[in-house]
Image (tube, grey):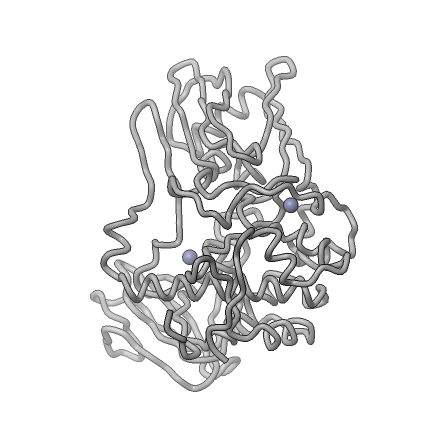
Amino acid sequence: MDLLSRPLLNVGIMSGTQIEFSLPKGAERRQVSLVDGCVCYQGRLYPSLEFNVGSFTLYGVTIGVDFHWERSRDLDYAGILSFIVEGDKITAVNKVDVEEYLLSVISSEMKSSAEVEFLKAHAVISRSWVLSQLRSRRENKAKVKAARPKGMVDSPKRHIQWFDHEDHTAFDVCADDHCQRYQGLCMAVGENVRTALQETCGEVLVYDGKICDARFSKCCGGTTELFSTCWEDVDYPYLQSVKDPFCDTSDPDILSQVLNDYDLETRDFFRWEQRYTQKELSELVRKRSGVDFGTIEDLVPVERGASGRIKRLMVVGSKRKMEIGKELIIRRWLSESHLKSSAFEISREGTDFVLEGKGWGHGVGLCQIGAAVMASKGYGYKEILAYYYPGSEIEKRYE
Ligand SMILES: [Zn+2]
Ligand SMILES: [Zn+2]
């Protein structure tokens, strides 16, 4: 593959019919609003609008959309601000140097006090992911959507759906957990994060000369999962299921390296339990799925992935039976927000349902807690990456 020059990335930050912002950051508030399908700014209409004054503030940015840590913040950013119209909303897009973007992503995702080798591993996979997004979107803009539609089988008997990153058409990546959490300049960047990025500048993970789809999640629960359990029905040689003896930890020093403060609200992730009365579960599933199952009488795993994550689950109600999947649908339909993972056993206590689960997230690729433990035991970032992405190599794509 050709060497890339250091690319600029288009990051979709927020959408709305009205967006408040400041130029430069912290200055007086201004606003744009949607009028007649255009961006209306100071009484004039524009098809799109771009500001390049070096920095800006956006007000009321939602982070953790739909997750239990969802909250709204005012955030500062570096680089160019543009407003584009997408459907019936305006989207604020930040054009930013890819290494700048990564500085913020790594700082948003993890504590800057984390071990350098762990941060380096994360820098490489975050960079790999974002460069592969950029390349596939720009090379096959039209083709991508046509060739890889969002997976969906919806019939009265089956609802199998998955979500991947191809959703964005107007920008490269979004700023939330759907892609990678990006909170602009608001994250204080620590020395370790800066070092990790400088020492791995331009390095990506490759397999057979192609940039890897380097997925990662919070905690695999003891075994990592296969791609096909969560997304499209394909698997990759470097995303095998591996045993992870590292992530069973409750060491607060390690956890505080990986989990930001609001993530520390969730500590029970290696093993967890969720209980529902039959009535609670029946109402919850009706509310979350929009499907009236009547009273839920049973939950039967139909197929599990290599880590134990349920890929297809039979929901048996008094009015109907339906097979649902993949893992994210199962996590959404069985929780007010999201179950931590779909790796759970189901038992009954009287009429109550008890879900005993392991892990947090889809479990594919690098396990963040496990990788942090490996770094604390003295493993280098290359060893960590080789462990979670067997057969992959590291290649420098730009200086
Ligand atoms: Zn996204
Ligand atoms: Zn793990």
The residue drawn where x is 43% and y is 43% is: 235
Residue nearest the observer in this picture, 71 or 116: 116
Identified at 60% across, 43% down, the residue is: 242
Give the quarter the ligand 2 occupies.
top right
Q: Is residue 169 above or below residue 309?
A: below
Q: Is residue 215 visible?
A: yes
Figure check: 375 above or below 39? above
Which residue is depicted at the point 40% across and 65% down?
Answer: 12
Q: Could you tell me which residue is drawn at 60 percent across and 77 percent down? A: 198
**Residue 18 can be seen, yes or no:** no
Q: Quadrant of residue 135?
A: bottom left
Q: Is residue 37 above or below residue 7?
A: above
Q: Is residue 343 left or right of residue 111?
A: left
Question: Foreground: 261 or 344?
Answer: 344
Q: Seen in the image, is 323 located left or right of residue 374?
A: left
In the image, residue 221 lies at what x, y percent? 64, 40
The quarter of the rendered structure image containing the N terminus is bottom left
Task: Return the x and y of residue 362 as percentages of the image width and height.
Answer: 53, 43
